[in-house]
Structures are given as C-alpha cells and as structure tokens.
Image: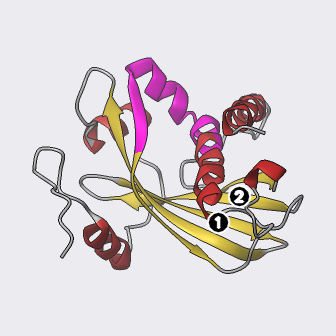
C-alpha cells in the first residue's frame, strides 16, 4: 500500500477518533497507532526496509497532529511542519505482516525547533526509535516563531525541558542554514 493511502487512512481514523468523547489528546500525551508491516515495506532481506521506518513514523506524527487539534490550527493559519533532522536506531527487525504500535511523543522545544520521539513497539518491546527535529513554516514564507505558535495553541501543561543530549544531537547533526554555503567537499 502506497504511503499516501496509508497517510489518508490514518488522517481519517484520527479525525474520527478526535470527534469521540476522550478522543482528543493533550500535546504531551503519547500517541499510539497500530500498523502492520506490508509487502511494500519489505526489502530483499525479507524484513522492513530501514528507510521505510521513517516514512511509517510520519503516520504517528499525523495522528498526533490531528488528535491534539494542532493540524486544524496550522491549516487555518497557513502553517505546516517540516522535519529538519532525524536519527533512527534499530534493535530488532519487523517482519512481513507483523503488527506493531507506533508510539509518538512531543519531547519539547528550544528556541528554533520542536522535538519528537517515535518508537516501533511490539508487545511492549522497542524494536526501533527515532528522534525528530522539526520546524513550522509559513506558507507565506518564513519560519514560525514559538511565541506565535504557543499564542495560537496554548503552551502545553507539564512540558518537560528538552534533555541536554537532545541539544547535543541537534548541534552535531546540523547543516549550515540555507542562507550560507554548504559545498560538498570530501576530505
């Protein structure tokens, strides 16, 4: 199944869940959706392709955006989220037709980005984990500041500070801004 169709299905299910009593979640909640490893996710080694994990984790972000109400607010204002960095670590392979849960959680923010964590979980055990650094952009141009974002959606209660290692990861994995040169020179 193409990721576009999967995404549309997740969006529809999240919207339906958000309309039910107790279906809305706080931005600090852990979002969970059940997924199955499909034939289109598998590589020649007969397990989920390493590149597919990040695409599948997108589904968890879409679910959380809808169920928190953030997606509607962002669309109304002409904002959209983009991933600026991501790192994934694997423990175990997901096999064809294996059911697993994508767990998604907002870790916090710094002055430039929002941080999220995704996990692929089977029967309570983590198979893979990804750390995501995201920005919110304006369709009219430019980056949305956090003060404007939180003024529109409110500041989440109980939001923890981003742990120091996350800041270190962000700094170590950063490329130069789009306003500075980034030549491809191999030493």
Query: Is 69 within the magenta?
Result: yes
Q: Position of residue 7 (x, y in %)?
A: 68, 36
SS label for mark 2: strand
Where is 152 relative to 36, above or below? Answer: above
Q: Quadrant of the N terminus?
A: top right
The residue that disc 2 covers is: 102
Specify whether 138 is left or right of 105: left
Q: Is residue 104 visible?
A: no
Q: Is residue 95 visible?
A: yes
Q: Who is closer to the viewer here, 89 or 38?
A: 38
Q: Quadrant of residue 149?
A: top left
SS label for mark 1: strand
Where is 101 relative to 63, above or below? Answer: below
Q: Quadrant of residue 171?
A: bottom left
Q: Position of residue 97 (x, y in %)?
A: 89, 58
Q: Quadrant of the C terminus?
A: bottom left
Where is 167 relative to 157, above or below? Answer: below
Q: Position of residue 11 (x, y in %)?
A: 69, 32
Tell me which residue sits at (43%, 66%) in the image.
160
Q: Which residues are magenta?
A: 63-82
Tell me which residue sits at (31%, 68%) in the image.
173
Specify whether 48 is left or right of 176: right
Give the total number of marks visible in the rendering.
2
The residue that disc 1 covers is: 119
């Amino acid at each position: 199944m193409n990721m576009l169709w999967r995404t549309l299905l997740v969006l529809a299910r999240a919207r339906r869940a958000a309309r039910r009593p107790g279906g809305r979640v706080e931005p600090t909640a852990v979002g969970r959706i059940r997924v199955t490893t499909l034939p289109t996710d598998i590589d020649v080694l007969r397990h989920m392709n390493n590149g597919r994990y990040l695409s599948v984790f997108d589904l968890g972000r879409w679910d959380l955006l809808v169920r928190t109400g953030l997606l509607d607010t962002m669309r109304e204002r002409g904002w959209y989220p983009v991933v600026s960095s991501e790192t994934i670590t694997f423990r175990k392979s997901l096999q064809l037709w294996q059911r697993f849960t994508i767990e998604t959680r907002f870790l916090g923010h710094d002055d430039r980005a929002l941080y999220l964590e995704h996990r692929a979980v089977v029967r309570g055990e983590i198979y893979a984990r990804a750390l995501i650094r995201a920005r919110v952009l304006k369709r009219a141009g430019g980056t949305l500041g956090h003060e404007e974002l939180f003024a529109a959606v409110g500041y989440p209660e109980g939001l923890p500070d981003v742990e120091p290692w996350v800041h270190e990861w962000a700094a170590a994995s950063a490329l130069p801004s789009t306003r500075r040169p980034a030549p491809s020179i191999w030493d």
